[in-house]
Image: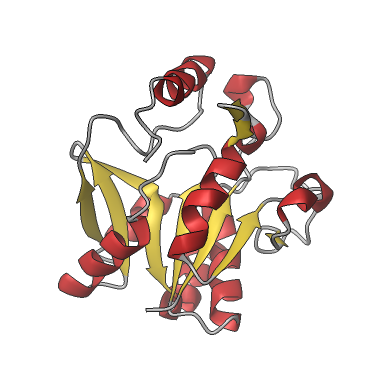
Amino acid sequence: MKVSGLILAGGRASRMGGGDKCLITIGGRTILAHLVERLVPQVETLAISANGDPARFEAFGLPVLPDAGSGGAAPARCEGPLAGIVAGLAWAEACGQDALLAVSGDTPFIPRTLAKSLAAAMSTAPARCAVARFGGEPYPLAALWATSLRSDVEKRFRAGERAVRIVQQSLGAAHADFEGAYDPFLGANTPADVEALKTLWENGAVRD
């Protein structure tokens, strides 16, 4: 399976005082840098999903995909991560890929086997979408989507659906369970989360 990766960096970080959560520093590196390092070996192509000025991500040398229909501008109303997934599926399809691995841009310590495990779950089910799960809790923004879903997902988005979880459920998504001493999908949603991520790094728990 040929897989493209997409880092969903469009969150507005309202609980963090605004700004790009993916540019928060953990262990001397941005969350985005941690994600890129973990994703590059798992995918054939990688992009960032974000609106606004793409120059802020220039140092990473990755394509920056604006949300579906935004034209790259920061929309007046946040359409949520599904807009980024729609754009990402179109990009991955154009790249000739079989699937899109989409991950939240505030989760620096995703598993290094994420793409492989999700692909196995999708194949076993069988299904065209697979979602990561830890401790019985699904993480809709850590998922593998077959590019053959592009038209279907886009239609749902155009019809007004914005909940990624609802779309995945309607598609009969498979799940891949992950285990370990820490939640690899912990995101920097609050200042307390950022401190927890820093502690994981300082304790060496995530330096695998």
Chosen colour scheme: secondary structure
**In the image, is 100 to the left or to the right of 173?**
right
Q: Residue at x 40, y 36 (%)?
A: 207
Q: Quadrant of residue 206?
A: top left
Q: Say which quadrant the N terminus sits in.
A: bottom left
Visible residue check, residue 160: no
Task: Report the label total.
Answer: 0
Q: Say which quadrant the C terminus sits in.
A: top left
Q: Residue furthest bottom?
A: 96
Q: Quadrant of residue 64?
A: bottom right
Residue 120 position within the rendered picture, expressed as x and y whole percent measured from the top left: 23, 68
Residue 87 position within the rendered picture, expressed as x and y whole percent measured from the top left: 61, 66
Residue 51 position within the rendered picture, expressed as x and y whole percent measured from the top left: 73, 50
Residue 42 position within the rendered picture, expressed as x and y whole percent measured from the top left: 43, 63
Position of residue 106 relative to residue 162, above or below, is above
**In the image, is 140 to the left or to the right of 84?**
left
